[in-house]
Image (spheres, coloured by chain):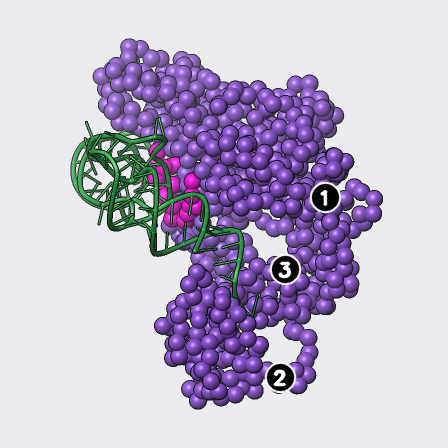
Amino acid sequence: MSKDFKRYLVTAALPYANGPKHIGHLAGAYIPSDVYVRYLRSAGKEVVFVCGSDEHGTAIPNQALKENTTAQAIIDKYDAQIKDCFQQLGMSFDIYHRTSEHIHHETSQEIFLNLYNKGLLTEEVSEQYYDDKANVFLADRYIVGTCPKCANPNAYGDQCERCGSTLSPRELINPTSTLTGNAPVLKTTKHWYLPLQNYEGWLTDWILKSHKDDWKVNVYGQCKSWIDAGLQPRAMTRDLDWGIKVPLPNAEGKVLYVWFDAPIGYISATRAFFNELEEKKLKYATPQRNFVNAKATDWKHYWQDSETKLIHFVGKDNIVFHCIIFPIILKAAGEYILPENVPANEFMNLEGDKMSTSRGWSIEMHEYLADFPQKPDVLRYALLTNLPETKDSEFTWKDFQAKNNNELVAIFGNFVNRALVLTQKYFDNKVPAQSSLTQIDQRVLSELKDFPAKIAASIDAYRFREATASVMDLARLGNKYLAETEPWKLAKTNMAGVATILNISLQIAANLSIVVEPFLPFTAVKLREMLQFNQLNWNEAGSANLLVVGHSLGASALLFEKMEDNVIEKQIKKLHDSKKEMELANQPVIPAKVEISFDDFSKMDIRVGTVLAAERVEKSKKLLKLQVDTGIDKRTVMSGIAEHFAPEQIIGNQVTILVNLAPRKIMGVESQGMILMAEDKDGKLRLLHPNEAVSAGSTIS
RNA sequence: GGCGCGGUAGCUCAGGUGGUUAGAGCGUUGGAUUCAUAACCCAAAGGUCGGGGGUUCAACUCCCCCCCGCGCUACCA
C-alpha cells in the first residue's frame, strides 16, 4: 500500500479570485498542505508545491458589475490580495500562478483538444436563454422569474429559495435577466460534454476498490455517493466572453467550463515553474529549495511519472471535482498520473455559525493580518489545533486567545525562555557541556529521540492536529524536565549537573526549532536566531548533539506575547458589527416586475381564509396539507411550509389565500388554491393576515 | 423521503480490524515551586460514549430502529 515515491507534487486548491478569502479556507486546504510540504522539504524529499488564482467563471464578470469595474480589474485586485496574504502567512508555494496566464490557456486548450480529437467529448445542441440587450447567454443563476411550483416571483433559474425547488430556467414564468431586467429569449447553442458515465466502472475500481482504506472516510463516502447515484454527461464549455476560448472552429463566444480549466491550472503552474527556472527569469516562481539544472520539460516528471506522488489538498466542497471530474479528465487525456490522495477537510465554523464572507460572518485573511501584524503563527497554531479533519470544527476568539496564552506563551515560549535565561545566568550564554547522566537525563534524551518519528508519522497520515499536539508535547517535556531537575537549586551544589541539564534543555530547544518549522515557520526562524543555529534537517532531529559545547547563543527575546481580553472582545464585536452591516447591504434589490393592467390584477381572487386543520404529509419534508375555510367552501390546500410551521401552530390562523388558482395534484392530493406568504430576507416564511380578524371569505383588493 | 458524514467529559476534539478501571488539550479544584511572560510541574474531580433494541463470554467500537446536526438529492404547481 504505502509505496515509496521518488518525488512529490502537492497542490493546494486554487482560490477563486472573486473576493477575499477567510480563515476557513486556510483551515480547509492551505495550512495542512503547507505543513505537509515543509515537512517533506525538511526531510530532504523532492517536492513541488503549486497553487495560484482561479480567475475564470461567470462569477468574476458578475463581481465586476457589482464593483462597477472590469473582470480584469477584479482578478488583478484579488489575486494580488490573496497572494500577499498567503505570503504573510508563510505559505511556501514553489509557485503561485494565475489561470489567466497564457501558458494556462495553452495547456487547457491542449487537453481539451486532446479529448476532442480522441472523440471523447460529445456535442449537443440545446436551447438556452439569451439576453439580447447584454448580448450574453445567461447562467441559470442570473435569470429570475416566478416559481412554477410556489409562485414565488423571485425564484432563480436554478433554484427557488422560497420552496427550495431545483429548477431549470425554462420552467420559470415570466423570466427576466438580472443583468438588464429584460425578458431573455431562447436561442440554440452548442456545447461539448464529457460523458462522465462512461468512466463509472473505472472510478469504481480506482476509488471504491483500491482507495477504500487509504482515503479519508468523508472523502470516500462522498465519492461513493456520487458514483452510486450514477454520473451524467457534464458540459465542459459555456457561452461566456470571459475565460479560455474553446479551441475549435465556429466556437465564437464559447469558453471552457471553469471547473474544466481550474484543476488544469495545477499542471500549467508546474509547467510555468520549470520554464521560469530554465530561463532563470522568475516571475511567479518562488522556489523553496534547490532545483539544480532544472529544465522546462521537468514538469513531466511531476505529472507523468508513476513514481511521483500527487496529493490534492482541498476543502470538502471541492471533493467531487478533484476525485471524480479532474481524474476523469486526466485519465481520458492519457499519460497523466492520478492523485494518490485527496485529504479534504470539512468546514470550519465560526462562533457557532457557518463562515460566510457575504454574510459578514468570517475572519478574512487580510483583516486578521492587519489586526494582528507579526502574528501569523498564532493563527496557524489556532487553526492547526482545530482543523476540521474528520468533521466540521469550530473557531472561537476565546479559544484563539486561550491557545495563544496557555499553550504558545505558557508552554512553548516559556520553555525556550527558561532554557535561555538560565544559560545566560549560569554559563555566560554559551552551551555548557554534558557530564555524567542521571536517570532522568537519560529518560528525557530517549523520549526526545522518539519525537521526530512520531510527528512525522502523524503528518504522513494527514493527521495535522495530532502532529501539532506532539510538537507542543516536546515543549512540555522540556518544562517537565526543568521542574524535575531544578537546576536553579542544583546551582548551589553541583554546577556540572546544572551544565548537563542546560545542555539537554538547549538541545531540546534546538530540536524544537526543527520540528516546529513546518507548523510555525516564523517562530522557527526566531528560535534559530536566538540559538544561532541554522540547521533544518528533519533527519537529524532527535539528536542530543545539535548544539556543540561552547557555542555562543544569540540574544533571547520572547517568542510569543500574552493577548489581553480587550483585544479579543474587540474582534468579537467587530464580527457582530460586520454581520449587521452585511445584512443591511444585502437587502435584495429585486427589480419590479413587468407592468400589468388593472384587469390582470382583478383576475386574481384573493381572500382571507381560516385554517381549520393542518397535518404533515407522509414522506415529505416540506409539505403541509391544510383544510381552509374560504367562506365559499372548505377546501384542501397543499403548502410547502412544513419547515417553517408546525401544524398545530397554524390551525385557527387567518391566512391569505388565492382561491381561483387552477387546482393541481401534489403528492397525490388535489390542492385547491395557494396560501400567500411573506418571505423574510433570511428565507423565513410568515403568514399574512389582517391586523384584526375578519369573517372568513373576506375579499382582498 | 433517499444517500453520505457526524452526535464521546463544562469547551474543542482523539479513540485501525470489538477485550483489563473510555483518552488528550483547555477550563475547574487542590498541592508543590519560583529559573521563567503569576508562567511551569504534580494530583483530583468531571462522561449511563445521542436514545432504544439485538449479536457476543465481551461493544464507544458490529447489526436494526428512532432522535438531532451538516451536506447532496427528491416531493414543494
The residue that disc 2 covers is A603
Residue at x-position 79% and y-position 41%: A247
Q: Quadrant of residue A471?
A: top left
Determine if residue A520 is in view.
no
Label 3 or label 2, whichever comes before in sequence order = 3
Total labels: the figure holds: 3
Q: Quadrant of residue A589?
A: bottom right
Q: Kindly identify the amino acid type of the residue bearing the numbered disc 2.
A: Lys
Q: Chain of mark 2?
A: A
Query: In front here: A414 or A342?
Result: A342
Direction from residue A202 to residue A448 in the image, left or right:
left
The percent position of residue A417, horizontal first and vertical second, equals 37, 30
Query: How busy is the neighbourhood of tag 2: few (under 14 within 10 Å), some, or many (20 plus)?
Result: few
Say what secondary structure mark 3 lies in: loop
Which chain's colour is green?
B
Query: How busy is the neighbourhood of tag 1: few (under 14 within 10 Å), some, or many (20 plus)?
Result: some
Direction from residue A491 to residue A455 in the image, left or right:
right
The percent position of residue A380, horizontal first and vertical second, equals 47, 38
Is mark 1 in CB contact (under 8 Å) with mark 3?
no
Q: Determine whether A675 is above or below A52 in the image.
A: below
Label 1 or label 2, whichever comes before in sequence order = 1
Residue at x-position 65% and y-position 58%: A140
Query: In front here: A110 or A670?
Result: A670
Say what secondary structure mark 1 lies in: strand
Q: Determine whether A503 is above or below A477 in the image.
A: above
Query: In front here: A320 or A456?
Result: A320
Q: Indicate yes or no whether the magenta region holds residue A396.
A: yes
Which chain's colour is purple?
A
Q: Are marks 1 and 2 on the same chain?
A: yes
The residue that disc 3 covers is A168
